[in-house]
Each structure stands twice: as C-alpha cells, then as structure tokens.
Image (spheres, rainbow, N blue to C red):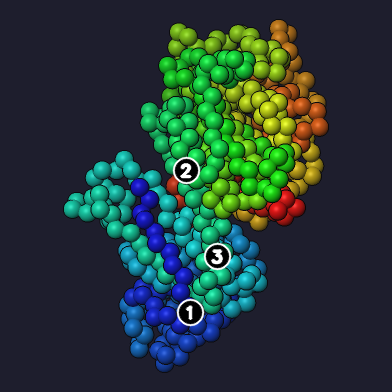
Amino acid sequence: MTTPLDITFVRLDAAPAATCAAFAASDLTLSPAVQALNTKSNGFVLKAAEAAEFKAKAKSSIEILVPQKLDIQRLILIGVGKAGEHNESDWASLGGYTFGQITARKAREASLIAEVTGADQKPEIVAANLAYGAMLRNYSFKKYLTKKNGDDTANGADAGAERGIKLTIHCADPDKARAAFETKRAIATGICFARDLVNEPANILGPVEFADRVKELESIGLEVEILDVEALTALNMNTLLSVAQGSVRPARVAIMQWNGAKSKRAKPLAFVGKGVVFDTGGISIKPAAGMEDMKGDMGGAAAVTGLMVALAERKAPVNAVGILGIVENMPSGSAIRPGDIVVSMSGQTVENLNTDAEGRLVLADVLWYAQERFKPRLIIDLATLTGAIMIALGKDFAGLFANDDKLADQLIAASKTSGEKVWRMPLDKAYDKLMDSKNADVKNMGGRWGGACTAAAFLNRFIKKDVPWAHLDIAGTAMDAPKNEISTSWASGWGVQLLDRFIADNYEKAEK
Ligand code: BES
Ligand code: MN
Ligand code: ZN
C-alpha cells in the first residue's frame, strides 16, 4: 500500500544518482561535499543558486538541471535555514520535505547528500533523522484504490507490481548512520502501523479484526493476550461491555507486553488506548455529517499498538504493557439506553446519561484492570475522547491531563523534542463535582461546559491513589490533523513519537 522505500547509506564520495538532493544552510553556506560538487561544475551550482535568488531559507528549494560536468540530471538544492538551531524533529521534518521534492519530480531513484555545515547534532543523527522523515513522508494509504493509485506507480499495466523508490543517503560515516537509523526505523514502523489501523474502514476493522492484528505482533516479540466477551464478563468489565452490547460485533481487550528491561519483574509502564472501531454515538446518535470520521475513534488504541511495535522493533530496555479496549458503539435493540446504570469493574456504579460519551466507559474498566493486574509504575491513556478538546486547543495540540507534575513535565519535555505538541489542561475538584449523579456513584457526562475537563475528571475516578496517571485527549490530533512534512495521511499516528521519546528519555537508562 505504501510505496516500498529502500534506504541505504553510503559514503559522501560515492557517485550520486541521476536525481540528487543536497543542502545549503543560511547565507548559502555549502558543506564540503556540496562545495566539491560546485567546484567540479566550475562554480555552476552557486551561480545557478544566485541566479534564482535562492537564500537557503528552511524548506525552500531550487532545481538545477543538468549541472555542468556533474554526471547527474538534476541537483535539488534544499534550504536548511539556521542549521545550528535544528533539533531531531526539525531534521526529520527536513527529510520529509526533501523526500517530497524528490517524489514530486517522479524520481524512482535518488541520492541525498546528508552533510550540513553548522548542524549542532552529530552527522549520523542528522542522516538518520533525514531518513526517518523520508520514511514517514512516504506513507500513504492506497490499498483500496484499484484504478488510480494516487501517484503514477500502479495504474494500468503496473498495477500489482508497484515499483519502489530507492533513496541513497550519502554521509560521513554510513555505519554509524545505519545504526542510528535502526532506532528511528523502529519508531517509523510503529507510526505507520498505527496510521494503517486508523485509516482502515470499520467494515474491515471490527474489534475482532483489530485484536487479530494485535495478535500477529507476537511475531516481533510482543507477548499478546486477547480477552473475549466471556473473559470480559468474568472480569466484570461491565461498562466496557455496555458500550459494545448494541453491536453485533463482540468486544475485545488486547494486552501487549514488552519486557525488555534487565529485570523482567520490574514494574511496567502501562499504556491504555481507547479503541472504538466506530462511534455512531449509539442511541444518543450523532448527526450524519462527518460521521464517517468516527472510524478513527480507535486512534488511542492504534497509537498504543504503534508504540509497542516501536519498543519491540528497537528492543527497548524497558518493561511496558499496552492495553486496548476495543468495541463498536452502535444503536440497536440491544444497545444501552440513556439512564441505564452499570456496575463497573471497580465496583462503582455509572449512570449513562449520553451513550455518545462511550470512550470513558471503555477506559474506566481498562484503566482499572491495568492497575489491578500490573501494578504499573505509571499509567498513560490515549483517547479520541471529546470534541471539546478541539474547541479548546484546535488540531495541533493534544490535551494533557495529569495527577502528577513530574509525569506532566516529562511528557511536555518529550513533546518538545518529538514535535508532537501537548498542552496541559486542568484536573480539578470543580470538574469532578460535576460528575456526581443523583442515581449512581458517577454519571458519564458533565454539563455543557468544559467537556474535555469533565471527561478527564470521570477517568480520574478510576485511578487508584498514588498511581501517577496522565490522560492524552487526542481527538484533534489523531485524525484529519493538519498535514505537515512528515504526515500527509488522514491518520497521523499521533502519540507514538511522543511516548517513545518519553520512555527513552526517562525510563531506559536506569533500567539497562
Ligand atoms: N469519539 C467522540 C469524540 C470525538 C469527536 C473524537 C469528534 C473525534 C472527533 C466521543 O466519543 C464523543 O462522542 N464525545 C462526546 C461526549 C459528550 C457526549 C459528553 C463529545 O465530545 O461530544
Ligand atoms: Mn462518542
Ligand atoms: Zn467516541
């Protein structure tokens, strides 16, 4: 579905392919390797750049066709801007931009000279992140386009035999770059896995099919258990089951464990995902317009799955568990009604006032289960939980709610380096009070105001004392989010990069 992309690393002096991309930093600063090309072409490269008034601003480019004496068809000169101010995610973004420039010219084979003067990251980190950005930019979801493939690769006679793209990255130390890229490739694989799950329509990806895809991850070294309705009933996961009861498709809970730490018994980090494969709203049915987007209401579960893929693929020295509550929210004769009261796994009774506030019911039981069974060091849930978070933050930031300042700060720090933005929102008694019900311990809906905050307050009722917990409301960022250099698909795979970074920066070194 995504065009196959073959990335290799070679030395800077290897002969470039017919399409070659190279960088210039601010003030048209050329690296030695690009300067060498310029010299070989009798200064033609710089002359052409100046003639085009190319200023090497970040993410700008010019194309120099058949440059004199260089045995190539085109040199795409890419502006870097101030090279010293780029972090890893900036290099990834530049890699995505560069890859976009290459594919826009329909090149199937290209070289990228990954040498940048003045970069404050190690050359192999720059090279690896450029490759990572290219890999993410290359993602597309075309599996159901049988006639037109989005680009010119698989139409007509080519269909089914899609040609791949070969990207050769020229760098100072190919061995080091290859090693650095292994980690980044693992993360990109996780992100693309998550994107595929979110893009997949709900007729193809029901709860059982989702669980099947998770089960297949045993092949990469994850320990996977799938709980069926019988098991969930025995566990008293009644609020989760109450959401699923209107659908003909049975609920599943998927549990993925990655025990990569030295001590296999060290308490794990727990990640919980909302996996509503389709959210019609149930009896409190949603308006028709845009309802198709609710195939993405499992974005939290997809991100947790993608994260576990990344951890396994890069053999992260950490113990982590990912748990997904997977259901379909449908209206039917067997669906839960407004006013129904259900006993959650925690024993708390929940009055369902709006069957469209279903994600929190799924999470209530899964969060409780995660704490009971795994006694985790900390727990983080991801959920496309409320439309209200988009009213508050738009589609560029996810809402972060946390009962622990250290955990919140670690996530905010990881957010800055990974480029996946979060904004801390309040967890407060005032919102908690709004969730009190006349008829049960808690109701599933607050009032008109502060919908994302009352949703978080509801979840908080299912978090045990002294368990550090964070909730990420990703309704705005998981799907239909603004496109950028490394994410051009409807599904972003949001959260994989953030959490991978969060783990790598805080929970790996001590555990080795
Ligand atoms: N899945 C939705 C939230 C959502 C909306 C995600 C739009 C992505 C895009 C969630 O289940 C929901 O319906 N929430 C309701 C809660 C309300 C009924 C208390 C909402 O936000 O309107
Ligand atoms: Mn809903
Ligand atoms: Zn939902």
The answer to whether 339 is drawn above or below residue 312 in the figure is above
Type of amino acid at the residue the image marks with label 3:
Ala
Looking at the image, is mark 1 or mark 2 earlier in the sequence? 1
**Foreground mark, 3 or 2?**
2
* For residue 510, above or below residue 358: below
The residue carrying pointer 3 sits among few (fewer than 14), some (14 to 19) or many (20 or more) residues within 10 Å by Cα, namely few
Circle 3: element type: helix
Query: Along the line of sight, which residue is nearer the eye, 241 or 260?
Result: 260
Q: The residue tagged with tag 2: helix, strand or loop?
A: helix
Q: Quadrant of residue 356?
A: top right
Mark 3 or mark 2: whose residue is earlier in sequence: 3
Does the residue at mark 3 contact the one at mark 2 (Cβ under 8 Å)? Answer: no
The residue where tag 1 is placed is 12
Occupied quadrant, residue 346 = top right
Q: What type is the residue that disc 1 sits on?
A: Leu
Q: Secondary structure at mark 1?
A: loop
Residue plotted at (54% across, 75% down): 173
Residue 179 - label: 3
**Other-residue count near label 2 (Cα within 10 Å), few / some / many at <14 / 14–19 / ≥20:** few
Judge depth for marks 1 and 2 and give the one in front: 2
Q: Position of residue 350 (x, y in %)?
A: 67, 14
Residue 302, given in percent of the width and then of the height, sits at 52, 38
Query: How far across and how far down the image is residue 281, in percent?
Result: 51, 21
Residue where numbered disc 2 is placed: 219
Residue pushed farthest bottom?
42
